[in-house]
Image (cartoon, rainbow, N blue to C red):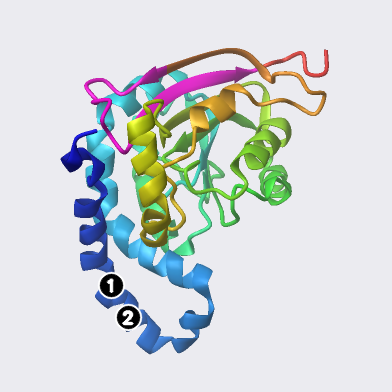
Amino acid sequence: MRLAASFGIWPDLFSALRVATLPTLGAIIREPSLIFRPTALSRQFMALVWAAFSSPTDEGARPTKLGLIKPHAKKTVLDIGAGHGHAIQYFERDAVTAYVALEPNALMHNEIRSRAESAGYTEMDGTLLIISCGAEDPAAIRKALDNAGLQVDTMLSIMTLCSIPSPQKTLARLVDDVLAPGGKLLFYEHVLSPRKDVAFWQRFWTPIWRLAFDGCRLDRPTHLWIQQLQDKEGNSPWSEWEVWGKEGEPEEHLWWHRTGFFVKRTDEGK
């Protein structure tokens, strides 16, 4: 792997530190207890980082997201780790009847509401639901969905599975307990490279990278974990799937992307 590519995290890391360090210190001065609440402190830092990074990151993946989301997102969409709600702009409004934003960082909720309302989804009419828990709490997710009278027909993960806790267990529970039979899981994620030299550097930099980006890991083979999922009976939950890469992306890339869709079986337990 070329040296320049292997050190590719540093421009983004320096940018994150530049935009978020001083404002985060200001937040600590205003609220000293943040020092003793690492999760809240990390979310404060990440909210500042994402305010600067989210739109350029979204723009860089626009063709890939269009090809994934627009033809496949239907009915009620659960956006795992919704961030600022950028996924909304790729919906066909007539096809997506409700948007459920799963976002534990409450500092991002106003951005979600703003984008959703611009696209015609509001809490007032029940077409927008914001859930504040993490993906690892499917019971809370189900309760919120049941209270709103919604079932998840499309589950969407855009650059999120890199940071959720216990990812394989969490994914299995979300698919088992939250995604409706016949529903689709759509994903666009940076994943562990199959190239050993790239994977070495992904693993090497992950401990540093995750500190600045709210637990984000470069070394998760998420696309393989999704494909290898098993339901409670030990069977594959999928009836069909398709996985592809990001067009024009070089192999020597610390953020090597996979995207695709998986369809949940309708004959569960058989």
State the residue in front, 5 or 250: 5
Kindly identify the residue that appears in the image at 39 percent across and 35 percent down.
Answer: 199
Residue hosting label 1: 21
Given residues 151 and 44, the one toward you in this image is 44
Secondary structure of the residue carrying numbered label 1: helix
Quarter assignment of residue 19:
bottom left
Quadrant holding the N terminus: top left
Q: Position of residue 154 (x, y in %)?
A: 55, 28
Q: Is residue 95 magenta?
A: no
Residues in magenta?
Answer: 244-264
Q: Is 1 above or below relative to 143?
A: above
Q: How many C-alpha atoms fall within 10 Å of the one at disc 1: few (<14), some, or many (≥20)?
A: some
Residue placed most toward the observer, 137 or 15? 15
Q: Residue at x 43, y 34 (%)?
A: 192
Res 119 seen here: no
Residue 251 sits inside the magenta stretch: yes
User: Where residue 125 sits: x, y (%)?
Assistant: 53, 45
Whether 37 is drawn above or below 71: the answer is below
Secondary structure at badge 2 equals helix
Identity, as a three-letter code, of the amino acid under mark 2: Leu
Would residue 74 be found to the left or right of residue 87 on screen?
right
Please say if 199 is above or below 216: above
Residue identified by numbered label 2: 25
Up/down of 191 relative to 57, above or below: above
> Who's the residue at 23% across and 26% down the image?
250
Give residue 32's quadrant in the image. Answer: bottom left
* Percent coordinates x, y for residue 65 in the rendering: 34, 28
